[in-house]
Each structure stands twice: as structure tokens, then as C-alpha cells.
Amino acid sequence: MDLSNVIMVSTVSASPDEGFSIVQLVLQADFVVQMVLLVLIGMSIVCWGIILNKWQVVRRAEAQSAAFVDGFWKSPDLDQVYQRTGRFPNAPTAQVFRAAYDELSRLTTGGTAGAMDLGLTENIERALRRATNTELAQLERLIPFLATTGSTAPFIGLFGTVWGILRAFQKIGATGQASIQTVGPDIAHALVATAVGLLAAIPAVMAYNYFNTRLKSVHGEIDAFSSDFLNIVKRHYRGR
């Protein structure tokens, strides 16, 4: 066989189908499959927006909290610490301290005797707990959507897969042929739906677990700071 003919045959056989692309495959898909893909792509875009936003928010919260706690222990005056809390607007520990200090100031104004009993520490503890819950709720906002995407996206993709396979079987029943030309496009649409579902779910699950771990660490730091501050209040006002 002539060498040029061999090269021509191999080139033709190795080249993809004319005009084939994922975009064309999606555009040629059934309306239901297209809607499934649109929903999955939308969920994935929202998830990536949440991931990028929360990564920045949590990073700022950790950095500012560390800086605030460091300044707290270096300062001998709680009034000075309170005045500097405005420098750390994204620090959960700073906001927790601010809420507790406001409650402490309210209870000790005028130096009433009743303010120095056990009720003082109980009120401070409640203020710390409320502020902690508020700060954690703010940090956790939108993160549950990642879990929702991670748990539902594969099933949404599976629905598109099942629909595509059903369409393929309908064509086989209508034409009486099971050739790749008949069922290939619908099978391809089904596989694309499965792939997009997994591409949406996997990053969402990984990000959800990652942020949960980071937020547990933040929660632990807030609890540790709250306990330390409450002990300082107890020592300072005990016996007054």
C-alpha cells in the first residue's frame, strides 16, 4: 500500500466527527436534559461564589481575631481594649468582647451592691453566649447551600441521565434499530448530565467540610476567650 494512502486513512480515522463539541451536544439535547444542566450549572456557579466569599470572610475573621486577642492580653486596661474594638470589625472575639463589656458596664454603673453578686457573672455569660451565637450564625450564613448542592446535585444529574436513556429506548422502539447513530446522542446527553452533577457536587462537599472545620476552630477560639474574660470578671469583682 502506498505510504501517502496510509497517512490519509489514518488521518481521517483519527479525526473527530465534523463539528462535534460539548456545546453542540448540549444544544442538541432534549429540553428536559437542558433544564437539568442549567440547574446544575447555576448551582455550581452559586457554590463557587459562596466558596470564594466565605474563604475571604473566614480568613479575615481568623486573622483579626488573633490580632485582637493578642492586643487584649497585652493591654492592662479593658477600657482601652474596648476603644480598639472598632479596628477589628471582622473579628468574632472582638464583637463578643464588646457585647460582654457593654453588659458589664450596664451592670456596674453606679456601683450598686446588687451588681456585684452572682447575677453579674450570669448576665455576662449570657451576653457572651448571645454574641457568640450571632457571630457564628453570620459566619455560617450560606454555607448550608454547599451541603444542599453536594447532596442533591448527583441526583439531579441522575434524573437527566435516566431521562436521556429513556429517550434512547424510545428511539429504538420507534425505529427498530439500536445503532450508535440512533441512540448515541441521547446516551451522550445522559452521560453529560451525570458528569455535570458530579462536577457540581464534589467541590461543594469538599468546601462544606473545609469550612466546617475552620468554623469549629473559630468557635473554639471564641469559647476559650469567653471563658478567660469571664474568669477575669469574676476575679476583679469578687468580694466587692
Image (tube, rainbow, N blue to C red):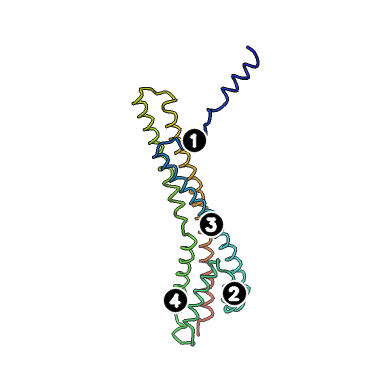
Question: Looking at the image, is 111 positioned above or below residue 100?
Answer: below
The residue that label 1 is drawn on is 24
Q: CA distance from mark 2 to mark 3?
A: 26 Å
Q: Nearer the viewer, mark 1 or mark 3?
A: 1
Residue type at tag 2: Arg
The residue that label 4 is drawn on is 123
The residue that label 2 is drawn on is 84
The residue that label 3 is drawn on is 53
Q: Nearer the viewer, mark 3 or mark 4?
A: 3
Q: What residue do we see at 46% from left, 83% from top?
A: 115
Residue type at tag 1: Gln
Crowd band around label 1 with a 10 angstrom C-alpha radius: few (<14), some (14–19), many (20+)? few
Q: What residue do we see at 44% from left, 31% from top?
A: 185
Residue type at tag 4: Asn
Judge by depth and name the residue closer to the eye, 99 or 165.
165
Crowd band around label 3 with a 10 angstrom C-alpha radius: few (<14), some (14–19), many (20+)? few
Q: CA distance from mark 4 to mark 2?
A: 23 Å
Judge by depth and name the residue closer to the eye, 218 or 95.
95
Question: Looking at the image, is 137 positioned above or below residue 185?
Answer: below
Q: CA distance from mark 1 to mark 4?
A: 65 Å
Rendered location of residue 123, percent (x, y): 44, 76
Question: Which element is circle 4 on?
Answer: helix
Which tag, 3 or 4, sits closer to the chain's start? 3
Tell me if I can see residue 159 in this picture: no
